[in-house]
Image (spheres, rainbow, N blue to C red):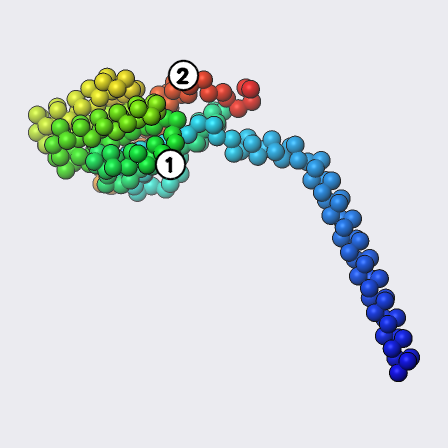
Amino acid sequence: MPYGVGAGRKLLDERRRELMKKVFFCLVCSVLLLNLGCDRKPEAEVAGKVAMKTEYTIVAMGDSLTEGLGVLPNEAYPARLEQILQERGWPVEVINAGVSGETSAGALSRVDWIISRLRPDLVILVSGANDGLRRIAVDDMEKNLDEVLRRMDAAGIPVILGGMQMFFNLGPAYVKEFEAVYPGLAKKWDVELIPFFLEGVAGEPSMNQSDGIHPNAKGYERITDQLLPFVERKLEKAGLDLFGSG
């Protein structure tokens, strides 16, 4: 028994020494890895800041034309716009706040949430198409959009307003009143107006999906290209710096 106990203790001591060696080796490796990480930290931080830097938030607010119904998320204009602006050096984020089927009343119902929760520096508002398709009274649409713009103005948020046009079969009087809403509101609230958001896209089979209403990927490319100078003017006016300029 004494021999057995002594041998057991000797074996236990050897195992403890081996364990301590392993622990010491792990500690040394950890220190070496930590030092290596510190040496590379500045480069990694710079890369991370370039990839993640977003100083300016643009919110694209609207209906299915904004959400991108029928196309991939990265094919809708908000994602394309963000990609192009970042490639051109603008530190921006573009949030797609489009809701398919939304009318101007729907836009009004969530404008406060967009202002308080998304905290946009710029809003691109494209609303009213569904009002026209449902032949909602133009006065109602105008009141809704007017209130949306009033609340944006009160919050100090600049807006780019996308104008819309309507099908002639709704009647010339309705179409004329509908289309006049956008320039009227743009003037009243001193916001930038895109006279017709779907210019060069509406009515072009190659630019639209099979329903003839919603743009396809190619259509969104054109929309983005046409929207880009409007947005960049706003960024320049805001004094936003390009990457690396500061």
Few, some or many residues within 10 Å of mark 2 (<14, 14–19, 20+): few
Which residue was labeled with disc 2? 237
Which residue was labeled with disc 1? 117
In percent of width and height, residue 128 lies at 21, 32
In percent of width and height, residue 220 lies at 33, 32
State whether residue 231 appears in this view: yes
Q: For mark 1, give the secondary structure.
A: helix
- Residue 175 relative to residue 68: left or right: left
Q: CA distance from mark 1 to mark 2?
A: 24 Å
In the image shown, does 6 or 162 lie closer to the viewer?
A: 6
- The residue that appears at 37% across and 41% down in the rendered structure is 73
In the image shown, does 243 or 8 lie closer to the viewer?
A: 8
In percent of width and height, residue 68 lies at 32, 38
Residue lying furthest bottom: 1
Residue lying furthest right: 3
Quadrant of residue 146 within the rendered picture: top left
Residue flagged by tag 2: what amino acid is it? Answer: Lys
Quadrant of residue 225 within the rendered picture: top left
75 over 163 or under it: above or below: below
- The residue that appears at 8% across and 25% down in the rendered structure is 173
Quick one: quadrant of the C terminus? top right
> Of tags 1 and 2, which is closer to the observer?
1
- Residue 5 relative to residue 101: left or right: right
Residue flagged by tag 1: what amino acid is it? Answer: Arg
- Residue 31 relative to residue 236: left or right: right
- Residue 139 relative to residue 200: left or right: left
Quadrant of residue 201 within the rendered picture: top left
In the image shown, does 98 or 70 lie closer to the viewer?
A: 98
Total number of numbered discs in the rendering: 2
Q: Which mark is residue 209?
A: none
- The residue that appears at 84% across and 62% down in the rendered structure is 17
